[in-house]
Amino acid sequence: MESEQAKAKLSSNTYDLMFLDYHLRGQATGIDLLNWIREEEREVQTIMLSAQDDRDTVLECIKNDFVDAEAICEAASRPSMRFVTPKTESQQTLSALHRVRDSL
C-alpha cells in the first residue's frame, strides 16, 4: 500500500492498531507515514515492523520500540479491539507469491 492510500483510509475510518513496514510502495517510508499519523494526532496505535539490514534505518526504527510496546498494551485493552484470524500456511504462501509477482 502507498502512503497516500493509508492516509486516505486513516482519514475516513477509525482503527485501533496499525502495523507499518519501513518499505511502502511509492516514495514515502513507514517512518514518514508514522510521522504524519503523529502530526495529525490520529487515535491509532502503531507498530513498526521491518527486516532492514541498514544500520541507520534499523536505529531509526528502534527509536520507536518503546512507543510500539505501549501501543500494543493500550490497543489490546480497548473494548472495541478487533482481532484478525491468523492466515493459514497456504494463505501466507499465496500472499508471498503475490508480493514477488508485484515486485517484477
Image (cartoon, grey):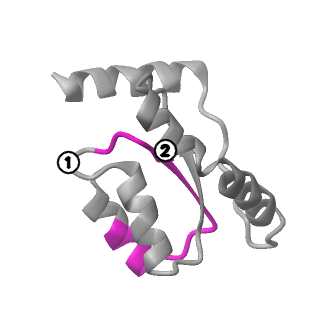
Image quadrant of residue 95? top left
Left/right of residue 99 with respect to residue 79 in the rendered view? left
Label 1: how many residues lie within 10 Å, few (<14), some (14-19) or many (20+)? few
Which one is in front, 29 or 2?
29
**Residue 100: in sight, yes or no?**
yes
Q: Which amino acid does the dot numbered 1 rest on?
A: Gly
Numbered disc in front, either 2 or 1: 2
For the point 33% across and 49% down, the residue is 29
Which one is in front, 93 or 59?
59
Instruction: Give the secondary structure at mark 2.
Output: helix
- The correct choice, above or below, for 32 with respect to 56 in the image is below
Left/right of residue 22 with respect to residue 63 in the rendered view? left
Quadrant of the frame with the C terminus? top left
Q: Check residue 13 for magenta coloring.
A: yes
Q: Check residue 9 for magenta coloring.
A: yes
- Residue for badge 2: 60
- Residue for badge 1: 26
Asked if the residue at tag 1 contacts the one at tag 2, i.e. Cβ–Cβ closer than 8 Å, the answer is no
Image spot of residue 87 (x, y percent): 59, 32
The magenta span reads 7-24
Image quadrant of residue 23? top left
